[in-house]
Image: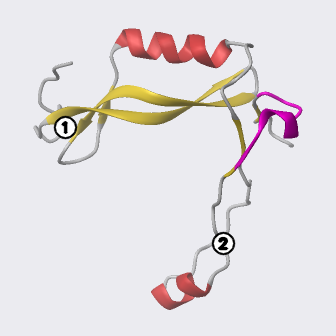
Amino acid sequence: MRFDPCEYCDGPVVEKSLTEYERSGGRLVVIENVPVGVCQRCGERYYLASVVEAMERIARMRAEPERTIIVPVRQYQEVPSSAAALRESSATYEVEEQSRADVEEPCFDAREDG
């Protein structure tokens, strides 16, 4: 795929395979290996219309996923400004992979509680 220079900073845009996150029907779906144009200077992302349509179709699929992951959900809180305080913080983001047999739902339930 060939991309024009970035419309924001005029930097070069190259194709990369990224992981994207789509919501469909209150569920969050992780889609891997999505072809995306990424500006090498500012990071702006560019998607072909056909790629966006394919991601939407994939997100709506009810077929068995390749695998399911568990993602911790945390509430927003003010972050300490010092680097030392950040290092001491126990807030981490880990993703656990589980086999299909260990999980009942094929996707994440991303509905709001309130």
Q: Tell me the quarter of the picture where residue 31 sits.
A: top right
- Residue 100 appears at what percent x and percent y? 79, 33
- Residue 93 appears at what percent x and percent y? 63, 61
Indicate whether 25 appears above or below 81: above
The local secondary structure at tag 1 comes to loop
The disc label shown at residue 91, or none: 2
Q: Tell me the quarter of the picture where residue 79 sits.
A: bottom right
Q: Residues within 10 Å of mark 2 (few under 14, many from 20)?
A: few
Q: Which kind of residue does numbered mark 1 sit on?
A: Tyr
User: Residues in magenta?
Assistant: 97-106
The disc label shown at residue 8, or none: 1
Horizontal side of residue 54 vs 63, given as left or right: left
Indicate whether 73 appears above or below 45: below
Number of numbered labels in the structure image? 2
Horizontal side of residue 21 vs 18, given as left or right: right
Residue occupying the point 59% across, 15% down: 58
Identify the image quadrant of the C terminus: top right
Indicate whether 45 appears above or below 59: below
- Residue 10 appears at what percent x and percent y? 10, 37
Q: Earlier in the sequence, mark 2 or mark 1?
A: 1
Q: Which kind of residue does numbered mark 2 sit on?
A: Ala
Report the front residue among 4 and 77: 4
Report the front residue among 111 and 19: 19
Residue occupying the point 67% across, 69% down: 77
Q: CA distance from mark 2 to mark 1?
A: 34 Å
Q: Is residue 99 magenta?
A: yes
- Residue 34 appears at what percent x and percent y? 42, 26
